[in-house]
Image (cartoon, grey):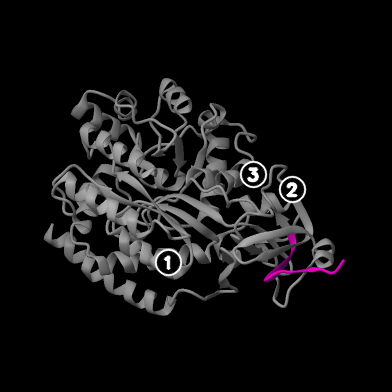
Amino acid sequence: MSPQKCDLIIYGSNILTQDENRSILTDGAIAVTGKIIADVGTKADIDLKWNSSKTLDVGNSIIMPGMINSHTHVPMTLMRGVADDLPLLTWLHEYIFPIEAGLNKELVELGALLGCAEMIAGGTTAFLDGYMFEDVVGKAVDESGIKAVLGEGFFEFPSPFFKTAKQAWETIEGLHERFLLHDRITTSITPHAVFTTTPDQLIESMELAEKLDVLWQIHCAESVAETELTSKKFDKRPLEVLCDNGLLTPRTRIHHCVDVTEQEIKQISASGAMISHNPQSNLKLGSGICPLTKLLSSGITVGLGTDGAASNNDLNMFEEMRTASLLQKGILQDPTAIPAQTALDLATVNGAKFLGLTDTGIIKAGMRADIIAIDMDKLHLKPVYNPLSHIVYSAGAQDVNLTICDGKVLYQNGKHFTCDVETISHEAEKAVKWALSRLKKH
């Protein structure tokens, strides 16, 4: 029997498939046809069954699914480092909100392009975003070749972006319509937080999410200070507001969940809602530590996110995996608390579920060809006893030498193929003067 033709064959020393058995293949290969993984197996098996005029041999590299960032505000790369070492509410109200009030579409698109390029170079192939002017964020996503779920954020009205709820809903529906047939972009409904909206707005926005059949995402229980502010405003804890108004559903995506009670964890679990864990942002803002092991043991699906680069200060999912694992080991004084496999699951398989994607996060026949490779010929990755361990505890974004999304090579050996990084970098430097001028006006 002669080999079947495919568009691309990728070879590497190890493949972390993330399949149901979490199989790790040595001297492996992946056959890709169009946007889809046609087959995965050993090099010998794939060469016997498949033939392609195009091959990529990444040599001594670990191949794995592209990572999935379950929570970020990608245009906030333009605010990276503008305000550090501050508590959440001070950081928001005295620095971030005044800068954001002066944003325009050109700046948001620039920040989005910068963030997409950074994520692609760091092995991220999909992300869930929440910000303003998401139509131009979608434009950046479309051009760069990455995948995204876009969420047009809104606050209690009137705000710098929407004077009324009607304006917000019209913009959100327009965004949804614009990307309805896009193969890599979907949308979501994105109230900022309980304390920056009203229960009526939250209920109305959930009704819109149900009408459009999209995800509904919100910051919630991010810190004790946020809980106190919400309790003062509504005489209820943040999650209590969501629960009492029927807003905990399978389409609900909650970001942070640092200050949660045992009862609230049970309610989230019973509802089918999912949580995004953002360890480095929570640590940098002094917000606290999410009870990750409790969430997972209760059956909640937890994704892993960076949050925005203004509070992190990067979009590096390798660091998030390592931090998520080490934090729980340390606070629980239990080295088995979050093993490497669980950390990798958060960034891949769980991330796909979090974004509502059923065809990514796993290297398996029939899945989308969202594939990355990590160069294991770096000194800090020698020697290799366990490829899985090295990915979580030793490797970093700088070690990624290949990023493929939907079968298209976006990045290889330090070179971007879809992003003009020289222009993006040059223009991003100009944003410093603009951001500082906003703070002076404030």
Q: Residue at x 28, y 40 (%)?
A: 205
Which label belongs to residue 340? 3
Q: Position of residue 109 (x, y in %)?
A: 32, 67
Labels 3 & 1 near each other (Cβ < 8 A): no
Q: Which residue is mark 2?
A: 23
Q: Dot 2, crowdedness within 10 Å: few (<14), some or many (≥20)?
A: few
Amino acid found under the numbered disc labelled 1: Asp
In the rendered image, the vertical position of residue 270 relative to residue 345, given as above or below: above
Q: In the shown orientation, is residue 305 left or right of residue 345?
A: left
Report if residue 392 is visible in the image. yes
- As for residue 6 lying within the magenta part, the answer is yes
Kindly identify the residue that appears in the image at 48 percent across and 67 percent down. 145
Is residue 63 highlighted in magenta?
no
Residue 385 visible in rendering: no
Identify the element where label 1 is drawn: helix
Task: Tell me which secondary structure the magenta stretch mostly adopts.
Answer: strand
Q: Quadrant of residue 2?
A: bottom right
Q: Is residue 420 positioned above or below 302 on the image?
A: below
Q: Mark 2 against mark 1, which lies toward the viewer? A: 1
Cα distance in 3D space between marks 2 and 1: 32 Å
At mark 2, the secondary structure is: loop
Cα distance, mark 3 to mark 2? 14 Å
- Magenta-drawn segment: 1-14
Which residue is disc 1 drawn over? 142
